[in-house]
Image (cartoon, rainbow, N blue to C red):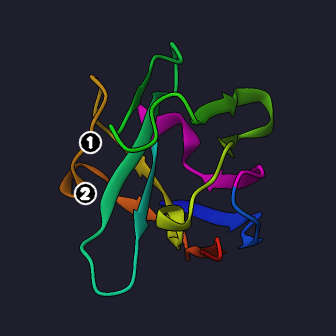
Amino acid sequence: QVQLVESGGGLVQAGASLRHSCAISGATYTIRAMGWFRQAPGKERQFVATIGWIRGSAFYGDSVKGRFTISRDNAKNTVYLQMNSVKSEDTAVYYCAASYNLGGPTGQDEYAYWGQGTQVTVPS
């Protein structure tokens, strides 16, 4: 079992920056990738970014490329999502997730464990 606890959401003005953290505990040795997803009101959950837990290779959704950065600190068992130049369309609940899969998983069904979600609001 893997447990994920997120922090770092909040209200942020357009153009500003925000960093999410996701603390990982439990059977961390089973993890092969960590990801971030988001879900806006009335919309389906959307892939944001993923990072390989061993090699650190990162992939991003088209809507956040060039603005968001995913990173991990293996020693601290923590994954981060740095959000820069945020826009109103970034408003959503953000979830971190853990996967057993290699190769940059981007689908929700490729992730076995999920955090509780944190709200990010960017007023328009």
State left or right for residue 59 relative to residue 68. left
Circle number at residue 108: 2
Q: In this view, does 50 lie above or below 88?
A: above
Q: Which amino acid does label 2 sit on?
A: Gln
Q: In which quarter of the image is residue 14?
A: bottom right
Q: Do the residues labelled 1 and 2 touch (CB within 8 Å)?
A: no
Circle number at residue 7: none
Q: Is residue 57 magenta?
A: no
Give the residue drawn at x 71%, y 54%. Answer: 20
Q: Position of residue 23 (x, y in %)?
A: 71, 54
State left or right for residue 101 relative to residue 38. left
Q: Is residue 31 shown to the viewer in this render?
A: no
Q: Is residue 21 magenta?
A: yes
Magenta span: 15-34
Q: In which quarter of the image is residue 9?
A: bottom right
Q: Where is residue 67 in the image (x, y as percent from the top left)?
A: 58, 36
In this figure, which residue is indicated by the disc labeled 1?
A: 106
Q: Quadrant of the C terminus?
A: bottom right
Label 2 crowd bin: few (<14), some (14–19), many (20+), radius 10 Å: some
Give the alpha-carbon distance from disc 1 to disc 2, as whole Å. 7 Å
